[in-house]
Image (cartoon, rainbow, N blue to C red):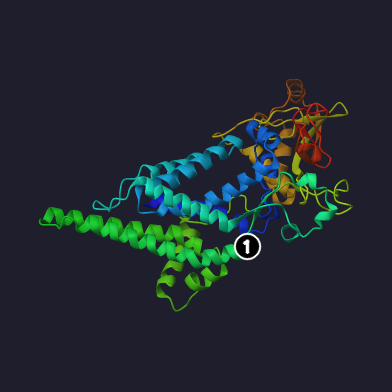
Amino acid sequence: MLSRVLLFKLMLMSGVVKIQSSCPTWLQLTALEYHYATQPLPSSLAYAALNHLNPFVQRVSVALTLLFEIPASILLLAPSVSVRQLGAKIQILLQVLIAATGSYTFFNILTLALAVGVYSSPPDLKFAPSVPTWVQTFFCYCFLAFCAGEMFTIGSLTSEHTSIDLQSVDTSILEHVGLNLKTGPKITSQYISTFLPRIVSLALFYFVVCGMSDVLLPFPRSMRSAMKSLWRLFFLATTLYVSCGFLLPMYTLTPALRAAHIDDPADIFSKIGKHSYNKAVGKFGLTSGYGLFRSMTGVGWEEVRAFTNNKKYGWAGLPPSVVARPEIVLEGLFDDKWEELDFKWKPGKLDGKPKYAAPYQPRLDWQMWFAALGSYQNNVWFISLVDKLLENCESVVGLMDIRPDLREKMDKGEMKMVKATKYQYDFTRVRNKWTEKIPNVVFAGESDGEFGRR
């Protein structure tokens, strides 16, 4: 039960916050046109996906991500084993795709473990009614299709969706565009405020029924069986308490939920729940909310005049998908010449092919991604990194991929200074009919770097 509750919470909150953030890339279903290049540690498959999946496929992929994370997560709480297994399969597929295109250490493995646990969970009730599996599966697909119809609309872009004058746009650039998100932040919050309490209440009620049936059936007829029943009752109560702790952060998703279930002074149960939640988070860190990739980073903007009659709209009738990944490059001064000090995993080298690091966690390369999004004042460890490089600290230098000739000079103390420069980095592109329309695109083989440009 706990694995189902935790996975449901993880996936639902991850999907909802993407829409609630009002990030244009999620609302316009263009997030993956940036994500493959702007995630912390892209893989070689991310480079291939960025170049070989056309814009329509990219937007369908974003739509499926939102569909899998929000409506499909409800299937994980279903009483039926076959329905739960379908929900688990969907989450397993999503995690495999995420893991293939990026390095997120053990995150995907841990989420897969939860999904596998849900998939392999036994029936809750010993005397459950039998419904053919194909009927349950059919209604699950009908439910997902209904949710997809409520969330998305299929068709050509209109001025209602883009707020632009389509007569000023070359219609040939719209051939890959036909999928739009209907449920914005306001509608999503309304849905969550309405349905989440009902779903959670039904799930907890069902868990209580299943637990009590396990406690009372068969009825204890001896001291030994009575003790077993008491132990099961204690286990049920503990499980329900922990489940409520897992679910409480979900009630902070919308102001309406917070007011009704967290801040209501008349609700004594909410008082107990709020106290337990604050204590668990503040002291023990047992439960928290999730907001994976709430807003897309590395989004660049260009003034595009070729197709939009001097208006600021891009090659697909939307703000152009221009990647501007902030990237820090370190250089050392050797014999009055600046030489780059390369890292092992993160993008930066223009001729460096993206590598796959998971499940290994290259902490330095990972932290450099966060440092590039902020300033050195908020990343004091970065000052220490530069200092250790100047001291030629072996444990720090060993974390990097510095050329052997430069390592030799560093061992001799010939590196006099280190400087850090922040660039806007992007992958090179493979030439095709949609990448040719990206503003200021650089194609592979036509620049100094085979895989990157800055």
Viewer-proximal residue, 67 or 56?
Answer: 56
Would residue 253 be visible to someone looking at this image? yes
Residue type at mark 1: give it: Pro
Q: How far across and down, in percent of the image, does residue 44 sit?
A: 65, 31
Q: Nearer the viewer, residue 47 or 289?
A: 47
The residue at the point 43 percent across, 67 percent down is: 273
Nearer to me, 126 or 57? 57
Quarter of the picture containing the C terminus is: top right
For residue 355, what is the image quadrant?
top right
Which residue is drawn at the image coordinates 38% and 52% (left, top)?
2
Counting from the top left corner in percent of width and height, residue 301 is at: 80, 49
Q: Nearer the viewer, residue 127 or 285?
A: 127
Circle 1 residue: 185
Can residue 111 be seen here? The reply is no
Residue 185, placed above or below residue 46: below
Left or right of 345: which side holds 198?
A: left
Res 182 → quadrant: bottom right
212 relative to 195 in the view: left or right: left
Q: Quadrant of residue 412?
A: top right
- Classed neighbour count for the residue bearing mark 1: other residues with Cα under 10 Å, few (<14), some (14–19), many (≥20): some
